[in-house]
Image (cartoon, rainbow, N blue to C red):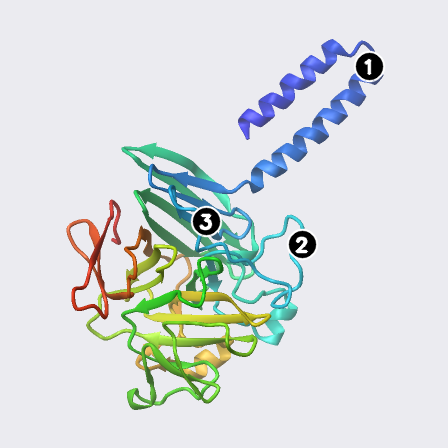
């Protein structure tokens, strides 16, 4: 901004020298100021880009979504999804909208009717406001670092996000502060959405999630009523969530799962064997105890899959969450006191796949690397992704 203002003042001085009459000077200065304002506005909305020798990450300032994560020598970007008019009114020019991997805060899902009348949007304000860059990308030892943040005026929350990209693994650490004069309940859900061409009929989704339910089914009252990952009953049909194919009705559905009591880490991966590419997420289950799988089919084609992880697994307004309290032994919301700051983090990574890779059986972090074991193979292959920055 200082550079831009300096350029404006320099231009004004030059304009006064070049233009001979006061009238021409005033007109020239007006044109210059308008042009500079347009440039400043465009610059304020330019995405944040982090690059290493092996990968590239792009984060939108409008809505704060992670809209690109690709290997430098691979053309596919799994996070290229954006909202479509059939799900939401058309995107207005210059306005933030849902795209890529966005943050749901202070809620996941719909507001109450009263909240909606007061302007609270679906999935909260975080993907609907402009984010500011506090620290531009800085290269250090082959890695890159940046910071950004936003304020949510209706929710009364402030968000600070630190990004650390090393190789093809990105650590994202977010700090949420309650700036309300009183404490409140809230939810915090990461919403990565994959889309074609990375998402196709053959794309496989794997996770260490265990038991869950479909949001369109009655809430399970105990473990015996829950589905076992990756199976779930959706609209009276037994579905395997590992694959999502074209042969079905248009529409969308959400299924939610929890992890075992002994699982310290939760993870989810999506792999496209034909493209030879895998994207994955890993986080602490203490931070995010729920995995929510969103599936969306449009015009007879697979259109999106959400690999969402967060603090809740019930896609309802807060009154319903308060009545239910917990499902499958996991809370449906968190509490943040006035002035309190809560920190959560996750790692997103990418790697190439060998031919005919059958999906992920197990993922573990060891010796500064994510180690991936192939499933369903008599001689399972191992993939290794170096990780410079890990969860605290």
- Report whether 267 appears left or right of 334: left
Disc 1 or 3, which lies upstream in sequence? Answer: 1
Disc 1 or 2, which lies upstream in sequence? Answer: 1
Q: CA distance from mark 2 to mark 3?
A: 21 Å
Q: Position of residue 203 (x, y in %)?
A: 39, 65
Q: Position of residue 173 (x, y in %)?
A: 35, 51
Few, some or many residues within 10 Å of mark 3 (<14, 14–19, 20+): many
- Nearer-the-camera pick, 309 or 37: 309
Visible residue check, residue 184: no
- Determine which residue is flagged by label 3: 68
Specify the quadrant of the image occupied by residue 353: bottom left
Query: Where residue 92 is drawn, which disc sits there?
Result: 2
Few, some or many residues within 10 Å of mark 1 (<14, 14–19, 20+): few
Q: Secondary structure at mark 2?
A: loop
Name above or below for residue 317 compared with residue 223. above
All told, the count of numbered labels is 3
Q: Secondary structure at mark 3?
A: strand
- Report whether 268 appears left or right of 305: left
- Determine which residue is flagged by label 1: 22
Q: Position of residue 239 (x, y in %)?
A: 40, 81
Name above or below for residue 4 compared with residue 261. above
Residue for point 48% across, 81% down: 320
Visible residue check, residue 135: yes
Few, some or many residues within 10 Å of mark 2 (<14, 14–19, 20+): few
- Report whether 215 appears left or right of 14: left
Residue for point 32% across, 46% down: 168
- Nearer-the-camera pick, 294 or 70: 70
Q: Secondary structure at mark 1?
A: helix
């Amino acid at each position: 901004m200082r550079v831009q203002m300096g350029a404006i003042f320099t231009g004004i001085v030059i304009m006064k020298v070049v233009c001979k009459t006061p009238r021409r000077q005033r007109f020239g200065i007006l044109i210059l100021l308008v042009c500079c304002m347009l440039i400043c506005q465009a610059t304020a909305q330019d995405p944040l880009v982090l690059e290493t020798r092996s990968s590239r990450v792009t984060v939108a300032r409008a809505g704060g979504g992670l809209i690109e994560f690709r290997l430098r020598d691979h053309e596919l970007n799994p996070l290229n999804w954006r909202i479509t008019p059939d799900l939401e009114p058309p995107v207005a020019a210059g306005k933030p909208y849902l795209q890529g991997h966005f943050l749901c805060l202070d809620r996941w899902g719909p507001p109450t009717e009263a909240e909606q009348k007061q302007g609270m949007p679906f999935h909260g304000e975080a993907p609907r406001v402009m984010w500011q860059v506090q620290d531009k990308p800085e290269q250090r030892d082959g890695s890159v670092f940046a910071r950004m943040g936003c304020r949510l005026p209706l929710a009364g929350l402030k968000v600070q996000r630190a990004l650390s990209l090393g190789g093809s693994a990105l650590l994202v650490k977010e700090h949420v502060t309650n700036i309300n004069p009183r404490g409140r309940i809230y939810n915090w859900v990461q919403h990565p959405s994959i889309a074609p061409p990375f998402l196709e009929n053959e794309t496989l989704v794997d996770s260490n999630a265990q038991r869950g339910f479909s949001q369109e089914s009655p809430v399970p009252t105990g473990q015996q009523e829950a589905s076992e990952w990756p199976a779930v009953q959706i609209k009276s049909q037994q579905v395997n969530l590992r694959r999502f194919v074209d042969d079905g009705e248009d529409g969308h559905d959400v299924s939610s799962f929890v992890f075992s009591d002994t699982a310290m880490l939760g993870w989810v991966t999506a792999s496209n064997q034909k493209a030879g590419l895998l994207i994955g997420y890993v986080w602490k289950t203490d931070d995010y105890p729920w995995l929510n799988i969103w599936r969306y089919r449009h015009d007879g084609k697979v259109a999106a899959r959400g690999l969402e992880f967060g603090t809740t697994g019930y896609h309802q307004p807060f009154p319903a969450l308060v009545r239910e309290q917990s499902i499958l032994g996991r809370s449906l919301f968190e509490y943040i006191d006035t002035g309190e700051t809560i920190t959560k983090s996750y790692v997103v990574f990418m790697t190439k796949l060998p031919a005919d890779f059958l999906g992920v059986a197990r993922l573990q972090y060891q010796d500064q690397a994510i180690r991936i074991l192939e499933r369903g193979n008599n001689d399972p292959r191992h993939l290794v992704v170096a990780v410079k920055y890990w969860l605290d």
